[in-house]
Amino acid sequence: MDGKTTCAMAEAGDFVHRYVAETLEQDELERFETHLLECLICQEAVRQGLALRAALREPEGGSRRWPVASWTLPLAAAAALALWFFLPSQGALERLGQVDPMPAFAGLPIRTPADSGAQLTDQGMAAYGAGDYQRAAELLNAAFVEDSSPAVGFFLGVTQLKTGTPSRALESLAAARQPLGNPYAAEASLYLAKAWLQLGQADSALASLASIPSSAGATYEHGRALADSVRQALR
């Protein structure tokens, strides 16, 4: 990963420190562990935190005894991480395919107000913004019949992933990658990989991640980190 790549969670430090100290609330824990599966920066920060914590616990004058599982794995729950990172398990791939947080919505191009597809899209994105992803998926699916633009296909695919229908998301996200070079193409490839991971298809996921161009910036770096985690899960 590029040395210039940063992570807001790692820089803030609070999540890392509280994770190592095992003081995160359950919802925070689930969120951070999902993030940790893809973020090499936070993985390294947690490794360092666990090493320091172990050193501080070392008895004075005693022999150094590192907690092997905690030192070699980035999560405190060593047994769970052995499953997620090092065993070729279906559950590990599915976890890597989770969508959290959802992609930000910055608005779609101006369309004709009388266009029924546009109205459905607007309603669907309003539901998306409100966190009602089931409703958003229904509305965007109806809108996609009339407006199969990359933007609609992308947000439809993401909501389908979030609501547990990755097989449907495959078609929507594949459509969002066309034409090549459109503003949603790179992110569509990233989330298409997540759809394949939810279906347990690691090879297809890696192929989709490999298609993300280096010019995609943060999306490219995210894809590289996710690909690294997929390969680790298959070892």
Image: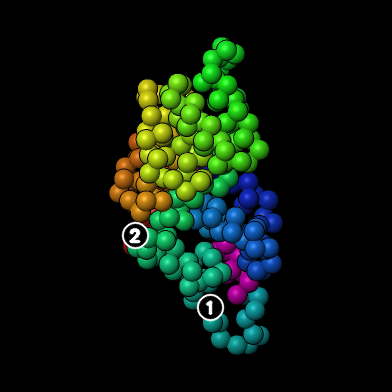
Image check: 144 left or right of 64?
left
Picture coordinates of residue 156 (x, y %)? 48, 34
If you read the primary sequence from the N terminus, does the residue marked by circle 1 or circle 2 appear first? 1
Q: Nearer the viewer, mark 1 or mark 2?
A: 2
Q: Tag 2, which secondary structure?
A: helix
How many residues crowd mark 1 within 10 Å: few (<14), some (14–19), many (20+)? some
Q: Can residue 109 be seen from the camera position used here? A: yes
Residue 174 versus residue 65: which sits nearer the camera? Answer: 174
Q: CA distance from mark 1 to mark 2?
A: 26 Å
Colouring rule applied to residues:
rainbow
Q: Residue at x 55, y 52 (%)?
A: 35
Picture coordinates of residue 116 (x, y %)? 53, 18
How many residues crowd mark 2 within 10 Å: few (<14), some (14–19), many (20+)? some
Looking at the image, residue 235 lies above or below residue 152: below
Q: Can residue 218 be seen from the camera position used here? A: no
Tell me the kind of residue under disc 1. Trp
Q: Residue beneath label 2, please?
A: 234
Q: Which mark is residue 163?
A: none
Tell me the kind of residue under disc 2. Leu
Residue 179: image quadrant is top left
Which segment did they paint magenta? 45-54
Q: Which mark is residue 66?
A: 1
Picture coordinates of residue 180 (x, y %)? 37, 24
Image check: 76 left or right of 15?
left
Residue 189 versus residue 173: which sits nearer the camera? Answer: 173
Picture coordinates of residue 191 (x, y %)? 44, 40
